[in-house]
Amino acid sequence: MTLWQPDPALIRRPAYQSLADQFARAIHDGRLANGARLPTHRRLADDLKLSVQTVSRAYEELIRRGLISGEIGRGSFVQTQRREPEPPYLPERLGEVIDLSILKPVCEPMHLERLKQALGWLAENLPSSSALSFRPNMVFPRHRAVAVEWLRLCGLDASPQNVSLTNGATAGMTVALMSVAPPGSTVATEAIGHHTLVPLARYLGFNLEGLPIDDNGLIPEALDEACRLSDIRAVFVQRFRNQAVVVD
């Protein structure tokens, strides 16, 4: 039997997950050596004052993670572990062409496998409150507080009730432009602008005026002239280029 034992004082709910995490840490840092035999389900349950079912679920979780193996009639053993974990990135290019036409994540078989593992874990550990109850119609207050703190670090003072979190940049653009650009108004932007801006202007009914840019972005003098010649209601600039579109 192994000398290392989980600490019952560190077990939190869900108990099987917490127990599996203790074993995983002991395996990764070498306290449980490769090939070490684990206590039987019943003995460990007695030692930790847990149910046999809880210990069984913890062992099943460790098997799912590839950390232990179970052999009928012999027991459970630590599997041989790779001391250098697989990096969560591609160590080398898979080809000579890199598609930069649209901002999207690099997705190779390794990433797909990680996603499958994460979704499998979520299916086993999803809290019932997340699946079987109503969610707030606005974001959680703690998420607003994080957003306000991030804005403060960026030099912007805001109150939580004035912060809206959106599902992506396009939704954020839509909310912002709806709040400042009524139908018939004019929004100035860079001559090579965000690719969703043109259809968004058409949908919301405001006009776009493209302004000259240089290597540093929008030319200030061009914006100054446009504001003197036209009734510019808002200026839209972007921090980086995704797909781009020419704005006349």
Image: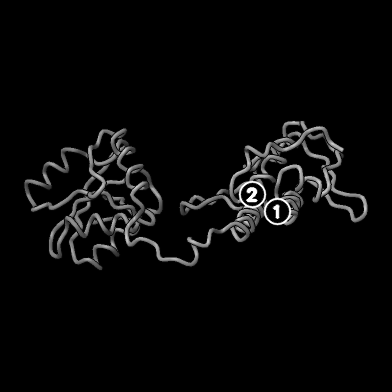
Q: Is residue 22 left or right of residue 208?
A: right
Q: Position of residue 60 (x, y in %)?
A: 75, 54
Q: Classify the position of the C terminus by image quarter.
A: bottom left
The kind of residue tagged 2 is Ala
Q: Is residue 143 above or below residue 179?
A: above
CA gap between label 2 and label 1 equals: 7 Å
Density class for disc 1 (Cα within 10 Å; few <14, some 14-19, many ≥20) is some
Q: Is residue 97 left or right of residue 234?
A: right
Q: Is residue 26 left or right of residue 157?
A: right
Residue at 62% across / 38% down in the picture? 10
Indicate the amino acid at tag 1. Answer: Thr
Residue, x 26% and y 58% (percent of image)? Answer: 175
Q: Kindly state the secondary structure of the residue where label 1 is placed.
A: helix
For the point 36% across and 42% down, which residue is it? 146
- Residue 168 placement: quadrant: bottom left
Question: Is residue 242 found left or right of 91 in the rendered image?
Answer: left
Count of all numbered marks drawn on residues in the image: 2
Work out which quarter of the rendered image holds the N terminus and state it.
Answer: top right
Q: Secondary structure at mark 2?
A: helix
| Of 117 and 79, the residue lying toward us | 79
Residue 85 percent across, percent down from the top left: 71, 38
Query: Is the C-beta separation of discs 2 and 1 under 8 Å?
Result: yes
What residue is shown with label 1?
54
> Which residue bears the numbered disc 2?
15
Residue 136 appears at what percent x and percent y?
Answer: 35, 60
Which residue occupies 57% across, 50% down? 106
Crowd rating for badge 2 (residues with CA inside 10 Å; few <14, some 14–19, many 20+): some
Residue placed most toward the observer, 61 or 179:
61
